[in-house]
Amino acid sequence: MSGKLSRLFAVAVAAATLLAAPSVVAADRFIIVQSTTSTQNSGLFDHILPLFEKETGIEVRVVAVGTGQALKNARNGDGDVVLVHAREAEEAFVREGWGVERFDVMYNDFVIVGPTAGPAGIAGMSDAVAALKRVAAARAVFLSRGDDSGTHKKELSLWRAAGVDAQAASGTWYRETGAGMGTTLNTATGMGAYTLTDRGTWISFNNKADQAILVEGDDRLFNPYGVILVNPARHPRVRAVDGQAFIDWLTGAEGQRAIASYRLNGQQLFFPSRIPGRPNT
Amino acid sequence: MQDFGDAFGLAFGLILTGDADLAEIVALSLRVTLVAVAVSCLIGFPLGAATAILRFPGRQGVVVAMNALMGLPPVVVGLLVYMMLSNAGPLGVLQLLYTPTAMIIAQCVLVTPIVAALTRQTIEDMASEYDEQLRSLGVGPVGQIGTLLWDARFSLLTTALAGFGRAIAEVGAVITVGGNIDHVTRVMTTAIAVETSKGNLGLALALGFILILLAMVVNGLAMTLRSQWMARAYG
Amino acid sequence: MVDLALPQGAALASRRPILPLQATGLSYATTQGTWVGPVDLSIGAGGVTVVLGPNGAGKSVLLRLLHGLLEPTSGSVTWNGRTADRDARLRQAMVFQEPVVLRRSVAANLRYALRIRGLRGAALREAADQWLDRSDLARLARRPAAVLSGGEKQRLALARALCGEPEVLFLDEPTANLDGASIVSIESLLRTARDLGTKMIFVTHDLNQARRIADDVIFMASGKVCERAAADAFFETPETPEARAFIDGGIVL
């Protein structure tokens, strides 16, 4: 490349990158929502948030991490709203004064996935606890999130109900990835292992290979999501008004309709809670 | 091998169709990293040169620390900067968390030690040759730093490129302080992380190829400019 | 034609001169032994003082002690009765055996030295041009200094040293690595400098060069000053056995 041309190109690249990048600071109104990877990666937010933004002019910025980290970030005041799926942790969050009030938003269910011709032989079962007992008995490889997330807490409660101390076997047939759902599913596919996942993430996941849903339908696999406003009394910089507007919309008729209308591969991933706007049902 | 082929094809397709999301992510990656490298050089060049030529108590400790900090784990840097910028932290009032500025700060922390340590080595190698002549001419320590840095400019460009390479490739720091927010703080590496977590391995790999291509373009451009610059300076 | 007496030179003459240079009990020792000293001498204005002697005699160390590049372990150096300060520094210059040129053009090298001495704008450009002409480097003015030949680089180093109109110029074997033609052009430039009134203190081990250019001679051996005399007297009738051996030996060490 000739001298002048490459210099011109360099200047053009520099100018383009400096000018073309989104002018983040210029956004007038926005809220930060600490949420989970299941809501983000499933595409739900991409579907419902534009509707809210168009109606209110409030941009919603989602930080999608695990439930544990989302609640921790919110305790630090680094979010205006949390939307997660770990009922007990959410209630503790409000009880300790970090959140104002918890509202039901939506629900779906968890499923156990794994190799169709797996060693534990649990395909088609609808009793999750019995299925996990078989997995333990067969010492079949089971992957845990191991990250204090909603999924992780649900998984541990199922092991407790099965009377199995799975964590004692950590490192043998029971393996803790300490990672998000997507990473854990990738690892499960790679190892041909069993794992617990929420249906929304599973349906939107594209590296299923030979893995499939093996166990579903157990009442204990119920997965409710809650939304909480971060307490402005504890963190004065919380955008309480806009945050509450989001919660009102989400639990109101429009938000609930938007959630219900989201389809992926023809399937509905999230179901709106039946009584919008009433706490702790 | 079929996956690689698919990924290549996907990468080409994204580039040729001028995919808008891709352009946005590439632009932000370049903006964050180029600004971070520029600031790191502004700090690291004089810091490295000063450490090279000045003698002060504890100098050896500073040199060791500089070299060791080159190996700072990005995820740790991300955590530390997060704790500083968090609303619960000392700099929360600046409201920088989850913005590109926070990402630039984190990458500066990562890149400055690299620039400083490499600059120190480069200048130290030159200093003994220049020392007597510069002192004879009446140049003080500050002037010596400036003169040595300018005379070392071609090596320093390579140092800057080393810093660029480190920054454009890291994900641990930017994902923690940036939050990987779509259209706001999503860069190439965090986009790859998200697509991987969705199981979209082909797309993740394609983005990876594009990132490598991006790094090659920047380096190629820098080296071309460098050799022209050198030709003018050396004849 | 450019006036040889620059405004800067006039200002120099009206200021207090830094000569004579006085060394008292000067010595330099390291853990490896005493390189130089003790040395007592006084160098006044006018002409070329050659510091002569065999290798290892301490000539280069003495030069650096006088110029202030080395701190003596004992003794002192004074300039016209005063200790060395920044003003004295800026009115001296030194040329080394290996020329150190900056990575920029030939003309920029000269401008660098001139800027340190406070010149700006038109005065700076004129001074640079004048010395480019005097050192026959004008046609190379915009060339990068790094591509010059050894002889040209040394001429540049010398021009750079002289363009600031120093009162004293130290030279440490400046032509030791050069061919005959380069030596001729360097010595010619030195004559120009001497005619302008610059005092030169010149270290060499080349007897013939010393005969060509010296006005007076300081002969050193084993770190001490053995003999000091006017050039003619020294070369005709050296007094000390070391000096006699050096001159008679005639070997370029």
Image (cartoon, coloured by chain):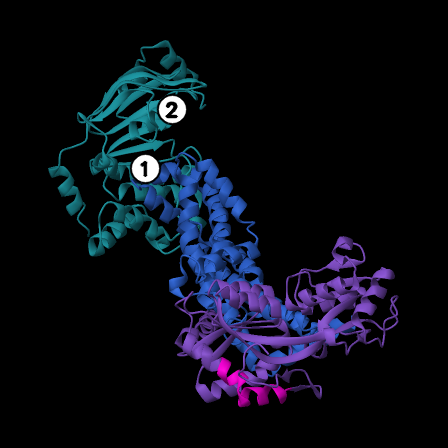
Chain colours: A purple, B blue, C cyan
Range shown magenta: A247-262
Q: Quadrant of residue A208?
A: bottom right
Q: Residue furthest left?
A: C14
A119 vs A243: above or below = above
Q: Chain of mark 2?
A: C
- Amino acid type at mark 1: Ser
Can see residue B7?
no
> Which mark, by number, is residue A99?
none
Q: Amino acid at mark 2?
A: Leu
Reply above or below: C237 against C45: above
Relative to B234, is B215 on the left or the right?
Answer: right
Say which element carries label 2: helix
The mark tally for this picture is 2
Where residue B53 sits: x, y (%)?
40, 40
Residue B51 drawn at (x, y percent): 42, 42
Left or right of residue B19, residue A209 in this image: right
Mark 2 or 1, which is nearer the eye? Answer: 1
Where's the C terminus of chain A, which quadrant? bottom right
Image location of residue C119, percent across then percent down: 22, 50
Is any part of residue C143 visible from this angle? yes
Magenta span: predominant SS is helix
Residue neighbourhood size for the residue with mark 2, other residues' Cα within 10 Å, grouped as few (<14), some (14–19), many (≥20): some
- Residue C229 covered by magenta stretch: no
Q: Is residue A262 left or right of residue B158?
A: right
The reply to whether label 2 and label 1 mark residues of one chain is no
Tags 2 and 1 in contact by the CB under 8 Å rule?
no
In the rendered structure, find residue C207 and report the number of the disc placed on it: 2
- SS class of the residue under badge 1? helix
The disc placed on residue B136 is: 1
User: Going 40% across and 44% down the picture, which residue do you hit?
Assistant: B50
Q: Where is residue C188? Give x, y as percent.
A: 31, 39
In this rendering, would A239 be left or right of A183?
A: left
